[in-house]
Image (cartoon, helix red, strand yellow):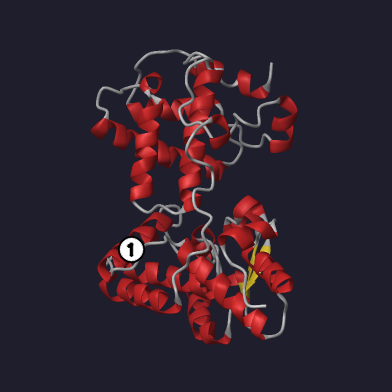
Amino acid sequence: MSPIKQNSLQTTRQGHQGSFGYQLLQVLKAIFRPGYSRHQAKHDGNAAIVINGKETMRKYTAQAFDFVRFLKVDYPDCRCPEDIEPEMCAAFIETLVARGVAGGTLGCYLAFIRKLDGALRYLGRVPEDAPLLLPTKEQGGTYSFRANTSTEAYCEEESTRILECVRSRGSKKYRKVAAQAIELMIATGLRIQEAVYLRAENIDLDARRVNLEKNVNRTKGGKPRTAEFDDEFVDFMVSLKAIGEQNLDDHGCIFKDRASLPSHVRAEIRRACLALGIKPLGSHGFRKYNAQAKYGELRNQGLDDEAARLKIAQHLGHNRIRVTRESYVSLGPQ
């Protein structure tokens, strides 16, 4: 019996036990295997089913309750996981698209629903021949994992206006930290998750760079990397480093409430864009702006397109330069 099967028997009982959100959580727990490597999962044939990472499980849990809130309003008769139907999932994704959710975040929601579908089948909660809750494009569905491969980014003027709007008109509780996180993304091109988990020790002022350390900084895939920042941001980075150095009892972290902070920052960005009449591109709009600005600098320094794009891919932490080309930096002047 595979490791996932051994730990899933206790959740195979059917019935309406606990709240809807609790029931979804129990289904996800059945396929949660922390410490079970993806390599081993592939060997056991469970890679498409299991959830390996703790951070991934935290995200899926939050998304599960978000999904439940939607179902309670739009489909009140749906009260247990077995009642979920494909049209409900499609309608939920449409609401996320309408909200302007970033492509990567939308992809996580798609992955969550597909994991839920696989878990329900694996546990025998739904028939194997039941329609897929959210089929991929290859399976005849509408949505792919990466919903938006556009290189569209906030321009310099928009980035400045959004930052100032958040700083002056954002919520009293989050405007200061949201503005700091946004400026950090503009300066370094970090992902929002990486930005809020930055520590004082990660900032190298002399070298004008931040050194990200695997899972400590919540880098994607636990991959360490270095991201540079320009001289114009030195004073700002000095202030962030000072904040972290004052938080030694919190491992030198710059931001507090790091688990929930990204969602609050995104909310501040959406509100600012709405107030300013700017198309909302999520937090990734700043990351893409940073990438395009640095690409322009490299081309002006004499690097050809391939060399400049490779340096940007390394700066952003992309394993494949194709991702940089398709979703961050379009072909520049020859």
Quarter containing the C terminus: bottom right
Q: Residue at x 68, y 20 (%)?
A: 2
Does 101 sit left or right of 145 as displayed?
left
Of 65 and 287, nearer the camera is: 287
Disc 1 crowd, CA 10 A, few/some/many (<14, 14-19, 20+): many
Does 151 sit left or right of 93 as displayed?
right
Q: Residue at x 26, y 22 (%)?
A: 77
**In the figure, 108 relative to 222: above or below?**
above
Instruction: Residue 267 in the image: state x and y as whole percent.
Output: 34, 58
Image quadrant where residue 262 sits: bottom left
Residue matched to label 1: 268
Instruction: Residue 263 in the image: state x and y as whole percent.
Output: 39, 55
Amino acid found under the numbered disc labelled 1: Glu
Quarter containing the N terminus: top right
Name the outermost residue toward the front. Answer: 334
Instruction: Residue 169 in the image: state x and y as whole percent.
Output: 26, 72
